[in-house]
Image (tube, rainbow, N blue to C red):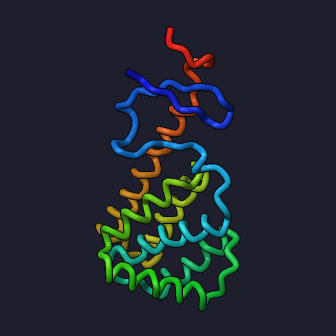
Amino acid sequence: LPFFTQPMDSKCVWVKPNRLPIGKPIHLRQYIGMPKERQKQIIFEVLCCVMVADGKASRDEKLRLVKIMNEYGCDWSTEEIGQRLTDFVSRVRADGFHKVLNAVCQKAERLDDDHAAQLVEKCHQLARTDDDYTERERDTVQKIETRLNQLAFIRRQLQTPVKSDCTQR
């Protein structure tokens, strides 16, 4: 049996259960109104995943990271970005790359579709910075892109009104 969710405009949407990720209810409100500082932190962590995927972060990648964060309107100093990167690498060493990547992807799913699409392009740019686009970097970018695209599809499905009066006919 289908169930419905109530988006912000209060129109009901019928959703087939097999279109939702198992064990993860979708609440549209979680994607609306995220503070900009939180968005910047998520964007930064996604980019860090790409940068450290191959086990090294070149000087050119670090400079590109600073440039990309500035493009997002981030006012963090170069030193602060460096410290955040050091903290991120420590977290990867402590918890493992794949666990951190999964957690970061889960956070990135809360970004709106426009930010997500831009972020995937920035991930590709960052990975290509040092002219050594490794298989691990490619796999990491692909995983990020897949997770964000799947969620964008689900959001579009949830926002398409199928029955406006919330009754099955």
Quarter-of-image position of residue 115: bottom right
Q: Where is residue 50 in the image (x, y as percent from the top left)?
A: 42, 70
Count of marks overlaid on the render = 0
Please report the residue visible at 43 percent of the width from the left and 78 percent of the height from the top: 130
Quarter-of-image position of residue 135: bottom left
Please report the residue visible at 32 percent of the width from the left and 62 percent of the height from the top: 139
Q: Position of residue 85 (x, y in %)?
A: 49, 83
- Indicate whether 116 appears above or below 75: above
Please report the residue visible at 58 percent of the width from the left and 32 percent of the height from the top: 6
- Indicate whether 114 appears above or below 141: above
Q: Residue furthest top?
A: 169
Quadrant (top left, top right, bottom left, bottom right) of the N terminus: top left
Q: Residue furthest bottom?
A: 79
Q: Where is residue 147 in the image (x, y as percent from the top left)?
A: 41, 52
The one of 10 and 161 positioned closer to us in this rendering: 10
Viewed as shown, does residue 159 lie left or right of 35?
left
Viewed as shown, does residue 100 lie left or right of 123?
left
- Indicate whether 65 appears above or below 162: below
Q: Where is residue 165 in the image (x, y as percent from the top left)?
A: 62, 16
- Indicate whether 41 appears above or below 76: above
Please report the residue visible at 44 percent of the width from the left and 70 percent of the height from the top: 128
Viewed as shown, does residue 2 lie left or right of 163?
left
